[in-house]
Image: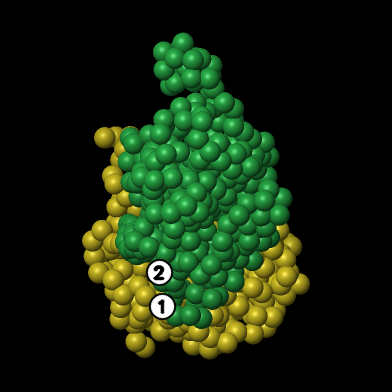
Chain colours: A green, B yellow
Amino acid sequence: MRPRRILADFAVFSKGYVRNPIALFFSLVFPIILIAMFGFIFQSGTTKVNLYVENLDHNSNASRTFLTILNHTGAVNVNLVAPSDANASGGFGQYLSNNGYTVGLVIPAGFGAAYLAGNATSPILYTDPQDLTSGGVAEGACTGVANAMNLAASHGKQVVTISNANVGSQVLKYIDYLVPGLVGFTILTSPMFAMVDISSSYRKDHIFRQLSLTPLTKGEWLTAKIIWYIALTFLTTAIMLSIGTFAFGAHVTVGLGLLPFLILGPFFFVSLGMLAGSIAKTPESAAVIGNVVTFPMMFLSGTFFPVSGFNPQLQAVAHALPLYYVIDGMNQTMLFQHYGTTLWIDFAVVFVGSIVVFIAAILAFRWRDE
Amino acid sequence: MPKVIEVDGLVKEYGAVTAVDRIRFSVDEGQVFAFLGPNGAGKTTTVEVLEGLREATKGTVSVLGLDPWTDGRELHRQIGVIPQDFRFFEKITPREAIEYYAALFDRKADAMGLLRQVGLDDKANARFDTLSGGQKQKLGLSLALVNDPKIYFLDEPTTGLDPQARRSIWEVIKTLKAAHRTVFLTTHYLEEAELLADQVAIIHHGRIIAEGTPASIIREHGRPQRLVVEGSPGLPELLRTSLKLPVRVDAGRAVVEIRERKDIVQAMVAIEQSGLPWSGFATESDTLEDVFVSLVGRMDDGVLKSEGSA
Ligand SMILES: Nc1ncnc2c1ncn2[C@@H]1O[C@H](COP(=O)(O)OP(=O)(O)OP(=O)(O)O)[C@@H](O)[C@H]1O
Ligand SMILES: [Mg+2]
């Protein structure tokens, strides 16, 4: 690896890139459109998720406090349901689905007494897999309030827990998930599609053959592409962070923990794109292979919807997708500030994966016709 | 003279197609070697094997003492190449392209100087996709010059160039030759080969059908030199009786096949002495192009006949 050659190739590639209006449009304007579009679509939904509450403990102060705070988070709109109505429908869950409601909460009888006594008690959150967004928002709000009450009354002892709740301690809005999700989306799509295209068009135009006649190595060439896409990722991330934060009020933390993912993500997907393009025999099959690899990741890795809201089968699928670990890693640092085992696992998966795919790509792609 | 290219028994097959069929030749250091042949003869295939871009099916190939296929990286530092259809990054300018190559080869390059040498300095800052076909070809040549290679492989470097541009490429090749560089050239312009080449090989259907200096090929495969005299209709008969050389009539002119220079003098003396009127005379000899056309044509006729009778 000679830095001078990598640098020279980087310079030529980046010049070619910025002089191509279409490529530039897709890499810079597309993320803006994406975040603006999703931001606007879900803006109203995120501020007012209708939460239907059956309060079986309606005489206690604790339950009323819980619901009042919940209403004030701004994330949900609490609507009380009379227990008699729920019973008439044959149960709360049935009641929700009869009325087309997607999120509901049952506060159990004895909630207030248990809270005061410091005994565990669990309100049950009903969510609809068809409406993961509202479910996620309600879950975040309920957990946040529960934690606040725990802190206030019992010095942090886990008294009130939301059943099945598994979200961070702050109330997360959809736009918060959307920022790392869409950063992940561009980390995936812009190098993947570009490299699949390059691998076949350079072959067709004999550019690889031309380069093989110089001292440039395949590793240097691929490294230059990786550096370019890392730079591009920093740029698009900055753009999306600004829009998400200033236009849609996203609350995300930007720290050093983000860096490895902004570097390794492009590293991984530039290599994967080259690998996909290289094992294909024709430009058409390269595009097909590229799409088959890319499309499941575009939707199932936590790009547009948090994976925690998926059903277990889909979650299992998500855990098999490399992009999941990039986005989850960014979620850990940007949303939860959890610098724990999960983050390290995400990092390890992406790190090892990148090296493996990089080497595989270099072995698979050929400068010359053989 | 040390040999810098040695090829023996080279065969290259593409599936069922045998593009190159057991060819053998060598090129001396400092020579301009012209490789000629009709379309599809196997020129590009041979060049690409020599450059290490294609693997030989059979035979041995040595360039600068290296096996091009296995020692490609080492070889590529010492050779310069213009591929037949040179293409480059679309949005990059010639000047940037040269600077890029200079960095890759770890050289210092005078980009403008190189572009001036091939006559492309006026397009130094134009993007590749706006260059004409000939201008792209010139950029290819200037890139081949960047690493000051020992051998140049130029696959049809002048195809599609205007006469002026072609001459400027010839000048570059002459300069290289003066600097004792070896040039392996393929071309369809026979006068180009005749002008530049020390050695010529003609390949047809993957086989070498003639080889040598341009003059020796013409001598061996061409028709004898001819004296053509215009004038009285009695001239052919006069020459036939007085010279004992074959004489034909072509468009009213007498055409004498001559063996030696003094045949010309004798013929003209005989005409003068006979008193028959004559208006002009000229000598005609075959060019490399005449030889090429007749050689290739003869072979094709042979192929067609044998196929027809089979
Ligand atoms: N990649 C390939 N696959 C299959 N056949 C090929 C391939 N490349 C060349 N050929 C065949 O090999 C033969 C020789 O081709 P080659 O390109 O060497 O000819 P050439 O002498 O350079 O012709 P031209 O003057 O047209 O450039 C042709 O019959 C051609 O069809
Ligand atoms: Mg050719």
Q: Earlier in the sequence, mark 2 or mark 1?
A: 1
Q: Residue at coordinates 40% horizontally, 69% vertically from top-left? A: A219
Q: Position of residue A257 (x, y in %)?
A: 47, 66
Instruction: Report the residue that reaches farthest toward the top.
Output: A88
Residue nearest the viewer, comparing A209 with B272: A209
Is A274 displayed left or right of A173 in the figure? left
Q: Chain of mark 1?
A: A
Of helix, strand and loop, which one carries label 1? loop
Kind of residue sitting beneath label 1: Met
Kind of residue sitting beneath label 2: Gly
Q: Position of residue A102 (x, y in %)?
A: 51, 26
User: Does residue B33 show up?
Assistant: no
Q: Residue at coordinates 49% horizontally, 15% vertically from top-left? A: A84
Q: Quadrant of the N terminus of chain B?
A: bottom left
User: Does residue B15 show up?
Assistant: yes
Whole-angstrom CA distance, mark 2 to mark 1, is 7 Å
Q: Which residue is mark 2?
A: A219
Q: Which residue is mark 1?
A: A1
Q: Quadrant of the C terminus of chain B?
A: top left
Number of other residues with Cα within 10 Å of mark 1, as a class: few under 14, some 14 to 19, many 20 or more: few
Q: Are marks 2 and 1 in contact (CB under 8 Å)?
A: yes
Residue nearest the viewer, comparing B123 with A334: A334
